[in-house]
Image (cartoon, rainbow, N blue to C red):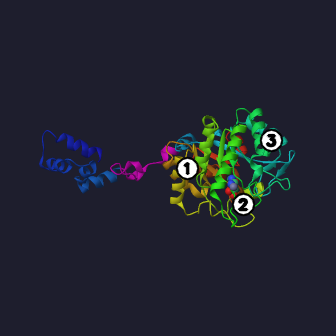
Amino acid sequence: MSFSSLVNDLSFKDKPSAASEQRRQMARGSSVSTFDDGRSHLSRARSYASTSATSVSISGDIASQLHGGYSHPLARSWQAERQLTKSMLIYPLFITDNDDEDTPIPSLPGQNRRGINKIVPHLEPLVRKGLRSVILFGVPLEPNVKDALGTAADDPKGPVIASIRLIKQRFPQLFIVADVCLCEYTSHGHCGILRDDGSLNNELSVDRISDVAIAYAQAGAHSVAPSDMNDGRIRAIKLKLIEAGIAHRVLLMSYAAKFSGCLYGPFRDAAGSVPSFGDRKCYQLPPGGRGLARRAIERDISEGADIIMVKPASQYLDIISDAKDIGKNMPIAAYQVSGEYAMIHAGAKAGVFDLKTMAFESTEGILRAGATIVISYFTPDFLDWLES
Ligand code: PBG
Ligand code: ZN
């Protein structure tokens, strides 16, 4: 409704004319827009004409004007619900059982497999720059260390447990997440214990994986994050944490919505965890399974997860948003996986976009979808980029 018609109407209030009476009858008990409908075509036309210089009608919808709200760089940043900060980032580390190793991973530009002796020198400058959290993946390289039960997963002298102790001692402020799975340690490369016919034995797998989780937690991990996708492992781990008397100090982060697909290739290269037969489709979710993901998220929350994770991230933004919706009262993590990272590097190398710009744009999308924690191989870069 234009200002002039409002004034007209008010001025007729005490001395009603036939026209204004009719107008007020039309407006009674209804919305402003109905009121507006009472205006003559002539006054509407005048109102448009009077502002034709700016092509904006003041009697029209003034919400059409948006540019002013984001013309300044600071105002642009205010448009986001969440800004990326250093404390949102978790940095994945691949730790081998070869103590002095420091080998670049060809399919993961800038990422190395490191032995225990190389971890502290690598982390020192990153912690100084504000690194707050790491997630550890063990990579056994010694011959004959893998077997059908993934026995090496909780070897007290193995790379994960040794590095938990070391990192905790040298960087007491750093939050340590231990990825929990068997695929790096099983001879067949699957994420659990198999039956004779090659299918996953869920019961034995859950039993074993929950033991491994407790071993990492006992060693000092602040968080255990089962990535295996066996049914019921969150509940089993939570119960064993309670039983061990450490549930109060260990955060249980569930890879709740973990989809199967082709984005984990570089990781499996890095971790040497390619399945020797078959694939992971029997336990990882089908890419189209939005409802299934919602059920998995609901289940893991009810089984005692403290944080829900969605993985991969950029291809599954709707799932992140669902996780935020279902898990209203908890933090949501998203894993920007190895294939996403490698794709961004490849795109930048091919001149499709600038690496830093794309790294930020992808992360902004992940945060916008609802994540408050991002597991990213870009973490060391972001520590620099967020400085400037
Ligand atoms: C192990 C595990 C995988 C990833 C995290 N934990 C690989 C897989 O499930 O095959 C993928 C991480 C990445 O691709 O960066 N269960
Ligand atoms: Zn696995």
Residue receiving disc 2: 265
Membership of 67 in magenta stretch: yes
Mark 3 and mark 1 in contact? Answer it, CB < 8 Å: no
Ligand 2 is located in which of the four quadrants? bottom right
Give the secondary structure at mark 3. helix
Circle 1 residues within 10 Å: few <14, some 14–19, many ≥20: many
* Residue located 31% across and 51% down the image: 47
Give the secondary structure at mark 1. helix
Residue receiving disc 3: 119
Give the residues in magenta: 51-70
* Residue located 54% across and 47% down the image: 303
Q: Is residue 214 above or below residue 365?
A: above
Give the secondary structure at mark 2. helix
Of labels 3 and 2, earlier in sequence is 3
Residue behind label 2 places its C-beta within 8 angstroms of ligand 1:
yes
Please indicate whether residue 143 sits to the left or right of residue 184 in the image. right
CA gap between label 3 and label 1 equals: 32 Å
Residue receiving disc 1: 300
* Image location (x, y in percent) of residue 239: 59, 43
Q: Which mark is residue 3?
A: none
**Amino acid identity at mark 1:** Asp
**Amino acid identity at mark 2:** Gly
Assign the C terminus to one quadrant of the image. top right
Of labels 2 and 1, earlier in sequence is 2
